[in-house]
Image: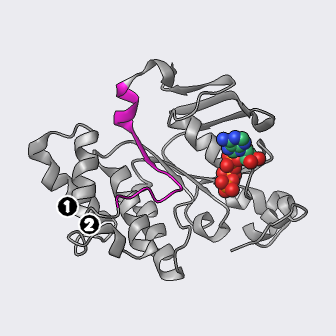
Amino acid sequence: MLEVKDLSKAYKNVQALNHVNFHLKEGIYALLGPNGSGKSTLMNLLCQQLKPTTGKILWNEQEISKLGYSYYQILGYAPQQQGLYEEMSGLRFLTYMALLKDIPKKEIQQEVQRVAQLVNMQDHLTKKCRAYSGGMKQRLLVAQALLGNPLLLLFDEPTAGLDPKERVSLRNVFDKLSHNHILLIATHVVSDVETIAKEIIFLKKGEIVNSGSVNELLEEYCQPSLEDVYLDLFGDDEDVTVD
Ligand SMILES: Nc1ncnc2c1ncn2[C@@H]1O[C@H](COP(=O)(O)OP(=O)(O)OP(=O)(O)O)[C@@H](O)[C@H]1O
């Protein structure tokens, strides 16, 4: 189980996260909030690319900062930016990521094929990354997060720039993984998560303003859809759009 306890993060003069608490077990959790609400900051804290100002992150009751390398063996992360090596083929990229993850050399080929198949990229691996569509790049990023079959999967805005068909296809991949993994998906796209997430965590200006299952939230806000709940919570904010 992953537990976040009283977690805060301040950049120079911006309080990006403010006393955040939650815990995650098996299944899909959605971190929903508009631009600037702190989603990426939280993701970066969870994968230890940032240090908290205060608070703790625990994996099975141990602080992740003390787990060292073993934490990276249970963690798969697909960041928001498409940090692909444009001149590498998908195959080389995944092989390279598998080496970085210390997957035994004799298992790499099979593992790369396994994750490529999960995201339906097995027929495109020989092409260079620069030739991929946005959706293919995104699927490759998801595939590298799945290498080594880590239990905890963090996806930051995984459907950014995807067309509707690609969104649905990625959503199905997440749904397939939900039975034996913990997934946290940060997004501002309500439709990406409303049918698959077991819990929605709403983040506003660095604070969790509500959380619960879709049904619980619809009931609480007396709204017909999660989009309406989202607009109830964030409709007054600048640049809020519902995709
Ligand atoms: N390195 C940084 N230095 C200063 N302020 C930052 C930094 N990174 C993020 N912020 C600020 O922290 C707040 C939260 O940003 P964050 O990127 O975590 O939000 P977000 O919900 O992921 O938004 P987006 O979807 O636009 O990335 C914002 O006000 C942002 O401007």
Numbered label attached to residue 186: none
Question: Compared with residue 128, is residue 205 higher up or lower down, i.e. above or below?
Answer: above
Q: Tell me which corner region of the image, top left, top right, bottom left or bottom right, holds residue 109.
A: bottom left
Residue at 80%, 46% (x, y): give it: 205
Residue, far front: 87
Secondary structure category for the residue under label 2:
helix
Q: In the structure shown, which secondary structural element does the residue marked by tag 1 occupy? A: helix
Which residue is at the front of the view, 180 or 183? 183
Q: Crowdedness of circle 2 by 10 Å Cα count: few (<14), some, many (20+)?
A: few
**In x, y percent, where is residue 84?**
38, 58
* Label 1 CB-ligand 1 distance < 8 A: no
Q: Is 213 inside the magenta-drawn segment?
A: no
Which one is nearer the viewer's eye here, 67 or 125? 125
Q: Which residues are magenta?
A: 69-85
* In-image side of 61 versus 229 (left or right): left
Q: Are there few (<14), some (14-19), or many (20+) residues within 10 Å of tag 1?
A: many
Residues 23 and 91: in front is 91
Which residue was labeled with disc 2? 117
When the figure is inspected, residue 124 is found, relative to residue 145, above or below; the finding is below
Marks 2 and 1 sit apart, C-alpha to C-alpha, by 6 Å
Measured as percent of width and height from the top left, residue 60 is found at 48, 26
Residue at the extreme left of the image, as rendered: 106
Whether residue 38 is visible here, answered yes or no, is no
Against 55, residue 129 (above or below) is below
Residue at the spot of label 1: 113
Q: Relative to 59, is 207 above or below?
A: below
Residue 143 visible, this orientation: yes
